[in-house]
Amino acid sequence: MPNKHGDFTWYELTTTDVDPAMDFYRKVLGWTWEKSEGQPGMPYYLCSMNGTQIVGMVALTDEMIASGAQPCWLGYIGVDDVDKSAEEIKAAGGSVHIPPTDIPGIGRFAMVTDPQGAYFYIMQDSSGNESESFAATEPRDGHCAWNELMTTDPGAAMQFYTGQFGWQKDGEMDMGPMGKYEMLRHDFMLGAIMPKPDEVPMSMWSFYFRVADIDKAVKAIRDNGGNVTLEPDEIPGGDYQINAIDPQGAPFALVGARS
């Protein structure tokens, strides 16, 4: 069945160097890559885990870099009507950076920011296929396990996202001086909203991909040119999280067990 309005349906890496990025994530997460044939003039790469497509990757052009684009991960949120959602996002104080655009055989998308400046895509699917990029109901290695928004205004962000996508707050955790960690539900646990730490330059989404062994992943990151910025830190439930930066400079996060 197709995903419903408000589901995270896809994740995309923009990078300055495609081949090394492929090799890095293959070694860290076990992903396999192939070039998509569906978008002439804009090389696009699809990543799979055990035969299931999970994320995409696109190279930043010189024009994009000159305009300030940097390597990063972005998420896609599914919507019923991308044109309507883009207008509603603008009316709620967000911005549209790429207007609604068709991808033949796939759907219609737009790049937007929330009122605090965090980038994401909205996507109206026309393929009829259900996305499995986000492991919503059970842990799946290689898939996204958690979506986390760090924002300059958590209260306003909560109002924006619950209003636009039907998400609900489902509890919170006190982080002391760092503020509250507020959980998000959309039939299933989706992720959380938290205050932006001072060292993070702007409001942004972070995506946690699951690995089988967090310590092996840390070693693979370091052995292949990445940088671990948060050492394994235990989280409720017994798993461990890390934050890292890939060799091209894109921040990402992992979650997994210790063997």
Image: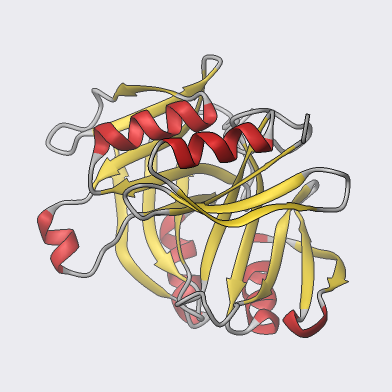
Residue at point 34%, 39% (across, down): 57
Q: State left or right for residue 96 relative to residue 114.
A: left
Farthest residue, direction top: 51
Q: Is residue 80 above or below residue 176?
A: above
Q: Residue 124, percent across and down?
A: 46, 46
The quarter of the picture where the N terminus appears is top right
Could one spot residue 97 in this view of the protein? yes
Residue at the image point whose x is 86% and y is 44% from the top: 238
Q: Quadrant of the C terminus?
A: top right
Q: Position of 192 compared to 239: left or right?
A: left
Which of the two residues, 24 or 81, is positioned nearer the viewer here?
24
Residue 15 vs 192, above or below: the answer is above
Give the mark count: 0
Of the pair 30 and 36, the residue shown nearer to us: 30
Q: Residue 248, how many percent across, how many down?
A: 31, 50
Q: Is residue 46 left or right of residue 212?
A: left
